[in-house]
Amino acid sequence: MQATKPLEESPIDPKGIIDMEVFSQIRDMDEDEDDEGGGGDHEFSKSIVWGFFEQAESTFEQMEAAIAEASLSKLSALGHFLKGSSAALGIIKVQASCEKLQHYGNMRDEEVGETLSEDEALRRIKELLSDCKRDYQVAMACMKRLYEEDP
């Protein structure tokens, strides 16, 4: 008998969090595995997604350290890095937050086309990082649900 998963009561809709077209391309890589008698358990794509989870958590730790050092250049580079990783999996909310973080690290608000002070950029990054981590947790829960794992 399978235990009831908490998410079953309030399913998380991946719409707006995960670009399912991009994510389905990742899952399509499992077709070769299925054809070769792999059992269709999506191990290949799952390993990519779980690798992203580890990478994101490590990057968030590095971002926290860069905030403590007030290193905007590191924050910009880390935002750029995580933006690319999340985009590759279709994790669009994290991708969007990381793009903003990358620009803030360059002391720019590209939405309004203005230059930020170092203090203002750091303030915005701290706030944005909190939102980004929350979006990441929601995306991780969605991904685990798509792979039928407990979050």
Image (tube, rainbow, N blue to C red):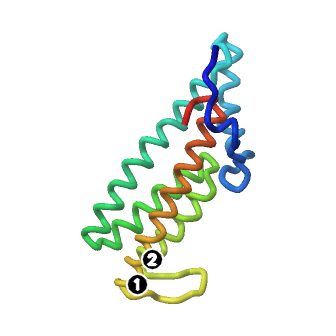
* Residue highlighted by disc 2: 124
Q: Amino acid at mark 1?
A: Glu
x, y percent for residue 133: 48, 56
Residue 97, by quadrant, is bottom right
* Residue highlighted by disc 1: 120
Q: Is residue 44 above or below residue 2?
A: below
Instruction: Give the quadrant of the N terminus.
Output: top right
Instruction: Give the quadrant of the C terminus.
Output: top right
Q: Which mark is residue 3?
A: none
x, y percent for residue 13: 72, 47
Q: Number of numbered discs present?
A: 2
Relative side of 70 to 57, left or right: left
In this view, the residue in front, 40 or 120, is 120
Secondary-structure class at tag 1: helix
What residue lies at 59% left-to-right and 31% top-to-bottom? 45
Mark 2 nearby-residue class (10 Å; few <14, some 14–19, many ≥20): some
Secondary-structure class at tag 2: helix
